[in-house]
Image (cartoon, rainbow, N blue to C red):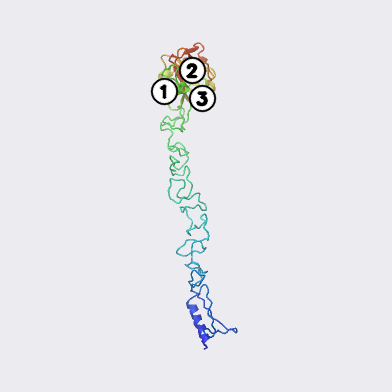
Amino acid sequence: MRGSEVLRQVALVLGVLLGSACFYIPQDSDGETGETGPETGELPEPMCGDGEVQAGEQCDDGNPFDDDACTASCSLAVCGDGYVHLGHEECDDGNSDNEDDCTDTCEDAECGDGFVQGVEECDDGNSFQDDACLSDCREATCGDGFVNEGIEQCDDGNLEDFDGCSPDCTSTYTCGDGVWEPQEECDDGNRSPDDGCSASCTDEYKRVFVSSSVHNGNLGGVAGADAICAALADDAGLQGEYLAWISSDTESPSDRFTHADMPYVLVADANCIQQFGDGGQPIIAQDWDSLTSGSLDAEIRCSETGEPLTTIYYAWTGTNRNGKASLDNCSQWMTSSGLEGGMTGGVLNVDIMWTFCLLCSSEECDNAYRLYCFEQ
């Protein structure tokens, strides 16, 4: 056998043994194997995949695979080259976009990786349930059952009312527990209707009383009169906001009060109710329009504790029957001088004189009279 043929057979055997390793076997122009060595001076040309790292190659592992440390193009495998390096990368999509299914660290995208992908609403990279993004990558909302720290006061997993957590997750109030919360108009400790406070803790009527205390014309202005009513109501355990039926040159019940579309009812104990004779809670007026019509359905004769008055049957008002200011107001209710006067109303009257005592005219401001107080 010719020497060149021997060389060809050896090369073929080595090719089988080494898999895809390539060998250059020179041939003559007629197809015969060419001779190598000093006689011809020709050597096999280097190429990627021959197992030898040549100039321009980063590596050469002698195989055509792209999933190992050296790609088929003789480049070192790196994240982002578009080939998944088995055992080292979970994915490789050839880009650095973190909003698709493969992150720029060649890991499969998942909730909690810090990148928002696919159906995720958010992804803050942690598993906390008390921040703006839940551990399942949903944005925190009222009703999800987790308290968003600093935003929500409670979250019971629903948007129902009166169950210990308000529908907006801002309060832990419960209607009917007897504790008056800002979200409630009232809370009388039960869920029964027709007792002044409804089953949903809204007012069924507005309460009215005349102050048990008496004061000269220096009330501290309209604000001072309001403060007196509020303090008396609070001391008596009355829930709600109470304002004084009193006017200055610039303020009056007409523009300060809630114009209620429900009855105004007198705060009254058994003794007070007995004085009215019908056995029921005395209704002062059916609504705001009735209240300002010029006459009442019943006298405002009982105090914040429900007790009937036994003396001093006048109240400072400075207010006409329509709820607007009259002329005299003890210098905006800031003086107790006997040289100045203020309009009063008669506590035992149900006609216009309940607020504008025509017979009394203006009373000297050094006198001590009561205040009408209305729930808003």
Type of the residue with mark 3: Arg
Q: Which residue is mark 1?
A: 232
Q: Position of residue 266 (x, y in %)?
A: 46, 21
Instruction: For the residues labelled 2 and 1, say whether their Cβ atoms are less than 8 Å apart.
Output: no
The span from disc 2 to disc 1 (Cα, nearest Å) is: 24 Å
**Of helix, strand and loop, which one carries label 3?**
helix
Residue lying at 45% horizontally and 21% vertically, measured from the top left: 220
Q: Is the residue 362 above or below the residue 161 in the image?
A: above
Q: Position of residue 198 (x, y in %)?
A: 47, 30
Other-residue count near label 3 (Cα within 10 Å), few / some / many at <14 / 14–19 / ≥20: some
Residue 243 locus on image (x, y percent): 47, 24
Which residue carries the number 3 mark? 256
Whether tag 3 and tag 1 are in contact, CB under 8 A, the answer is no
The foreground one among 227 and 78 is 78
The three-letter amino acid code for the residue at tag 1 is Leu
In terms of depth relative to the viewer, which is nearer, 174 or 231? 231
Residue holding disc 2? 331
Label 3 and label 2: CA atoms lie apart by 19 Å
- Dot in front, 3 or 2: 2
In this view, 13 is above or below 232: below
Give the camera-side residue of 269 and 91: 91
